[in-house]
């Protein structure tokens, strides 16, 4: 064949087989390893993918944390088809179209508090860049242009733009790419296996780690600090649930010093925790919220920043004929993405998917924690419909055990996400209890066989 047979089993049908796999430089992938034994997905419906050799694969990761309503949802398909035929593209610079305004109103209505102003972007990375830039421009608009420092957190993931990797805290995502943004500090992460292993929901220990912000303020002076950005629950670095009270404490310290607080809800938004946003779940109102992924159920790239009214108003003080923010993307509020977002938000509401996630969470939690005691498992943590299973690394081979688990799970019909030696599970919110059993059943069988 043109490339090695797919996971040994059935041959790919001719129609589904790409001519070659060389040209696509795959993101965040060991390209040579992948192309030697590719895993290709060719279709999807509800909870399942179909792989190129025809075997069904349950989606244990909502794609990449994005397909919250499950795959192939007719309502979204129709909205996209209708929109592409009616208005394929329209600029939103000095121009507009109704769907972008409607999508923004719908997102604003879903966000808590006065997070009522919506700036559209196309990816989580762009949303993060946008939020950081708004923070800097906000202080400048208020005559506090000295506030230029940005504060992120170790093990934070905020996408791959220069802003995002600068405030992010993943060594490999930073070290190859030069000097990055200057004037960035990082809070400590909150992960601690000695104190918090096998916690269900929010850990008891660790709220005081937010006080590190006081150290940074003392070091640089509040008058130099623009914003703090954190994921309420860190997703990509292994499902790190915030300790009880931690986010409230961050909010209090930010308030004390006039620092903006940004929640990156690219993963936690749209029901993952059983509420529309994590800010609602934890009862902490940030000044800005970044979102993407579940905004369109992953169907069309779209992201957004939700901005609180006073932040927005700081930009509206100049002459009315002057542009307020020198920022935007060709595809900000793209008509097809807007239509997909509206249909997606309709689906979430009609099917009560956020409430469904909340009601399934205890069952999911028990199923996840039942893996305790399996070989190499050293921690299990969860909140809403997301769980992290941490494996002890094979000496000198960080990530090998989780990667082998991913390969074997895929062969046995389950798609999982891994980061280092942590397995993350975040199924679509439409999952049924018997499918939760099946998911953890496959994973547990696979883990028993990993040496
Ligand atoms: N922020 C967070 C919290 C994310 O989880 C991600 C993606 N996993 C991003 C930003 C980046 O989003 P994108 O890949 O769409 O740029």
Image: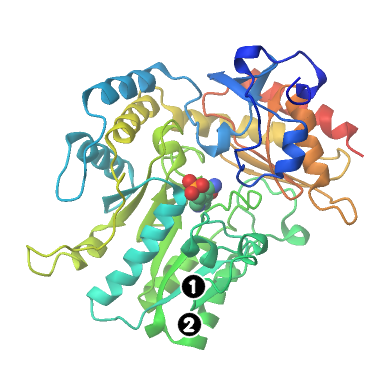
Between label 1 and label 2, give the one nearer the viewer: 1
User: Element type at marker 2?
Assistant: helix
Please report whichever mark, 1 or 2, sits nearer to the chain's N-terminal start. Answer: 1
Q: Position of residue 288 (x, y in %)?
A: 36, 58
Neighbourhood count class around disc 1 (C-alpha, 10 Å): few under 14, some 14–19, many 20 upward:
some
- Horizontal side of 448 relative to 286 (left or right) equals right
Snapshot colouring = rainbow
Q: Mark 1 and mark 2 in contact? Answer it, CB < 8 Å.
A: no
Residue at image position (23%, 76%) is 142
Above or below: residue 287 compared with residue 212: above
Above or below: residue 352 compared with residue 302: above
Residue at image position (61%, 17%) is 16
Picture quarter with the N terminus? top right
- Horizontal side of 28 relative to 193 (left or right) equals left
User: Closer to the camera, 442 or 17?
Assistant: 17
* Residue 441 visible in this rendered orientation of the protein: no
Q: Which mark is residue 446?
A: none
- Horizontal side of 308 relative to 320 (left or right) equals right
Q: Position of residue 236 (x, y in %)?
A: 61, 49
User: Element type at marker 1?
Assistant: loop
Q: Which residue is mark 2?
A: 217
- Horizontal side of 140 relative to 396 (left or right) equals left
Residue at image position (31%, 51%) is 329
Q: Tell me the CA gap for discs 1 and 2.
A: 19 Å
Q: Position of residue 216 (x, y in %)?
A: 52, 81
Q: Which residue is mark 1?
A: 181
Picture quarter with the C terminus? top right
Is the residue indicated by label 2 positioned so its CB lies within 8 Å of ligand 1?
Answer: no
User: Closer to the camera, 373 or 441?
Assistant: 441
* Residue 178 visible in this rendered orientation of the protein: yes
Q: Quadrant of residue 38?
A: top right
């Amino acid at each position: 064949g043109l490339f090695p047979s797919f996971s040994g089993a059935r041959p790919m049908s001719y129609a589904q087989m790409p001519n070659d796999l060389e040209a696509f430089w795959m993101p965040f992938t060991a390209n040579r390893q992948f192309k030697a034994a590719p895993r290709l997905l060719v279709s999807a419906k509800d909870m399942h993918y179909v792989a190129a050799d025809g075997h069904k694969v349950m989606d244990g990761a909502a794609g990449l944390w994005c397909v919250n309503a499950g795959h192939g949802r007719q309502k979204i398909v129709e909205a996209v088809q209708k929109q592409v035929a009616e208005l394929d593209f329209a600029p939103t610079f000095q121009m507009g179209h109704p769907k972008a305004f409607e999508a923004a109103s719908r997102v604003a209505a879903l966000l808590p508090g006065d997070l009522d102003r919506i700036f559209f972007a196309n990816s989580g990375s762009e949303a993060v860049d946008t939020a950081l830039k708004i923070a800097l421009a906000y202080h400048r608009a208020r005559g506090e242009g000295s506030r230029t420092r940005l504060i992120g957190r170790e093990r934070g993931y905020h996408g791959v733009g220069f802003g995002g990797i600068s405030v992010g805290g993943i060594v490999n995502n930073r070290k190859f790419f030069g000097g990055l943004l200057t004037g960035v500090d990082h809070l400590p992460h909150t992960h601690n296996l000695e104190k918090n292993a096998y916690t269900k929901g929010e850990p008891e220990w660790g709220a005081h780690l937010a006080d590190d912000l006081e150290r940074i303020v003392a070091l640089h002076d509040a008058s130099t600090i623009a914003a703090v950005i954190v994921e309420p629950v860190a997703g990509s670095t292994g499902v790190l649930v915030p300790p009880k009270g931690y986010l409230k404490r961050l909010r209090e310290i930010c308030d004390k010093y006039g620092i903006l607080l940004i929640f990156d809800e690219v993963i936690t938004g749209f029901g993952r925790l059983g509420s529309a946003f994590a800010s609602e779940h934890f009862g902490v109102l940030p000044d800005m919220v970044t979102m993407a992924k579940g905004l369109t159920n992953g169907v069309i790239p779209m992201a957004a920043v939700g901005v609180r009214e006073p932040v927005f108003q700081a930009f509206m003080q100049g002459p009315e004929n002057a542009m307020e923010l020198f920022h935007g993307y060709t595809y900000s509020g793209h008509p097809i993405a807007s239509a997909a977002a509206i249909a997606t938000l309709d689906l979430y509401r009609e099917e009560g998917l956020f409430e469904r996630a909340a009601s399934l969470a205890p069952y999911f939690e028990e199923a996840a924690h039942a893996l305790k005691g399996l070989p190499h498992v050293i921690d299990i943590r969860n909140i809403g419909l997301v769980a992290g299973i941490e494996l002890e690394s094979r000496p000198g081979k960080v990530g090998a055990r989780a990667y082998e688990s991913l390969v074997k799970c895929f062969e046995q019909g389950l798609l999982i996400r891994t980061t280092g030696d942590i397995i993350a599970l975040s199924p679509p919110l439409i999952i049924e209890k018997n499918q939760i059993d099946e998911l953890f059943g496959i994973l547990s069988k696979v883990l028993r066989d990993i040496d």
